[in-house]
Amino acid sequence: MMRNWLDRCRARDPGERKSLVNGTRIACGNSGQFRFAIPLSHKWRRRSKCQRRNHNVCRANSASARLRGHLIHLNIRAAGLHQRLTRQVVIIVAMNGADNRRRVRPVAPPEAGAAGHAPRSNVVGLSIGAIGVVFGDIGTSPLYAVEQIFFSSEGLAATPDHVLGAISAAIWSLILIVAVKYATLVLRADNDGEGGVFALYGLLHRYKNQGSRLMLWALMLGAGLLLGDGMITPAISVLSAVEGLDVATPAFAPYVLPITVLLLTGLFAIQFKGASGIGVVFGPILLAWFAAIAGLGGIAIAHQPEILLAFNPAYAVVFLVHAGFREALLILSVLILVVTGGEAMYADLGHFGQRPIRLGWFAVVFPALLLNYLGQGALLLSGAPVAGGKLFYALAPAPLLLPLVGLATAATIVASQALISGAFSLVSQAVGLGLLPRLDILHTHRHHAGQIYIPMVNWGLYLGCITLVAGFGSSSALAAAYGLAVAGVMLITSWAMFSIARRTWNWSAALTALVWIPMTALNGAFLVASSLKFLDGGFVPLSVGAAAFLVMATWRWGRKATFAAYAARSRMTMAELVQLHRAGQYFIERNALIMAPNKLRQPSDLAPALVSLLLDRYGILPRNLILVEVTHPKIPYVHDNRVRITVFARDKDHGSVIGVELRFGFMEEPNVERYLERMARHHAIDLPPHPAQWIVHVSHENLLPDPDMNILKRLRFRLFLFLRLVSRPAYYAYHLGDEVQLSAEIMPVRVS
């Protein structure tokens, strides 16, 4: 079969492609090089006689012996380890150091499947799920947002002009920032179906040499600000809900803080069980919540219909202009509370998709929020008393107050759970991008890889929440700390949209400026306004964000410096390694895998320094030497060319020297051991099929500072050493050691 394929290839013009049995394709190049694709799906054994007979890649080993000096590319559509992904294996047989890749015309890979996501045929069901997960934060904002304008320490008098102006400003903030910016525009900026600051990071990373490097640093800061927001949101949400007990009866006043602490403790304590058990009730609880707040608002509007004048944006403009510059900024610093949580639309894009999120927003959440904010304004216009300054609870009749407090508490717990899960996902993505240490990440569901639990993040958020509740004591005081982080993230997102609109959407410069300059200016105004409350509590999220940014920047620098210093120890090229291997008469009779820090494609590439160390120690090489490189492109999922195998030497008497590259996106679990086991089972690499018969050699770098380091670099170096202590070794993060034997070598590496 192989000989027939080669004859047909040589008989045709260079570059012509010929379809063979069952979709196998040959791309002919000058000199007869060829490239062919063999699908390895669940039906792969029925593809051809060759595959049925050998259960491997059609005797690629024996074929390569007849093709010395040439380059063979085997594109294998591998059976997916992840249900949602299409994978490819690329095998390069580079015998005798020959390299003719430039002469081989690539064959276009088959169409990739869905972008790594579950089928989304049930739009209504996904919309209900999105209501429970995406909109919990913004949906509970009526508990505390508008009342801060009129009942805080610097509150305004509830005159008709003030009320109409404040409600109009709240409505148009929702329309412009959430409905137009996020629901209509930003949701289009998906990265292979994923959203959030790290999706933007991945989209813009390809332009880092075209002026986008500063934007990448800004997105890292935005991720840190989101962690600060994830610390404040559970505290203010649950606290504002429990404060309704004080409105029902003053007897509950001494118990508001203890009950809040108890609820938060229980919430964080059960995180290790995962959200799958209670996630099914998130949507129905939030649906009931939105129905309740819409009903309460609608009743108040019916008694005071003139509040509908607030839809006129002129009231908002006049209100802010007449308030004066400083007072207008203070009002904007409160209005940011109305739109907090809107950024979750983009962050959770990968879980639900654009259509379900938009449907949930425009059909349920947006109308309910409008009705409730209008209802709160109608209550103020009526002159009705507001007990304890709790404007939201004043909408409810006395008999319904306690049930409403219970529903509000349940809704805020749902919102808090969504924020905590979002923090886990954010940190996991940062780990996948190499921006944070490899923390312990526990999967809480067998079939849903996205459901994870990170103990260090969980208890860090818990300590932050409890400290905030105890330190601020009330939702009104805590509101001063809220909003600055969200305003920063929204501004960074608007800034990033300039590059996305121009480079990804191919918008004209005029259209980009027309849309995003006003939007960026509006977000900038909110950020400036929120910064006025820096000393009142705004320093909390900013400090958390700055600390997270420092950690990410230090870890990123340290990893690059370590890899560079380790790679500099390599002196032997792959060609020299192959020559030594072929010249050997005696070998270590075992199968050795060595983790490689750099690419291994050409005979001129440097072999890992660990190979030289083993050669110096034992004087001979392993018979079968597999060099494994793991790379992380800045994309959520890898669909094509996940595995790249380069055969440098393969001989029946001397064994083999093979390089393997495995690629994983930042949303994927890098289970290297499982992929190597699959390749061994299909005889793509020379290993026994069971990992217990392997030995993986890894290096553990003993980092030493350069003597010429200044004091600031030494401090950064010390911080990186601390981060290494809390980080799992790379080989454990890659699941090496689950079954395979590990041999760790300590190597001194000097970092400059």
Image (tube, rainbow, N blue to C red):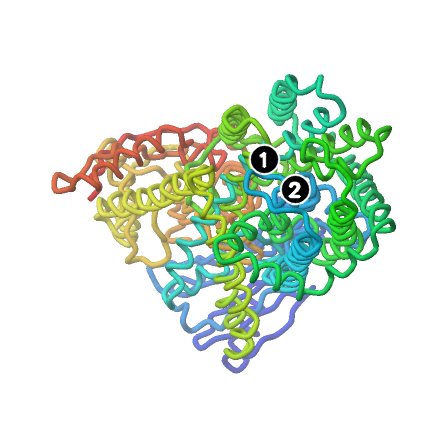
Marker disc for residue 23: none
For the residue carrying disc 2, how many other residues have a C-alpha within 10 Å: few (<14), some (14-19), or many (20+)?
many
Look at mark 1 in the image and give the residue it sits on.
476
Query: Three-letter amino acid code at disc 2?
Result: Glu
Residue 400 at x, y percent in the picture = 85, 31
Give the answer, above or below, for where 288 lies relative to 272.
Answer: below
Which quadrant, please, contains the C terminus? top left
Cβ atoms under marks 2 and 1 closer than 8 Å: yes
User: How many numbered discs, if any?
Assistant: 2
Look at mark 2 in the image and give the residue it sits on.
147
Q: Nearer the viewer, residue 369 or 490?
A: 369
Q: Residue 96 occupies which quadrant of the picture?
A: bottom left
Give the answer, above or below, for where 583 lies relative to 322.
Answer: above
Query: Three-letter amino acid code at disc 1?
Result: Ser
The secondary structure type at the circle numbered 1 is helix
Residue at the farthest bottom position: 13
Q: Is residue 159 left or right of residue 618?
A: right
Task: Give the CA separation, mark 2 to mark 1.
Answer: 9 Å
Q: Nearer the viewer, residue 511 or 149?
A: 149
Instruction: Specify whether residue 353 is in view.
Output: no
Residue pictured at 34% horizontal, 29% vertical: 744
Q: Residue 711 occupies which quadrant of the picture?
A: top left
Which quadrant, please, contains the N terminus? bottom right
Residue pictured at 55% horizontal, 42% vertical: 154
Q: Nearer the viewer, residue 107 or 731?
A: 731
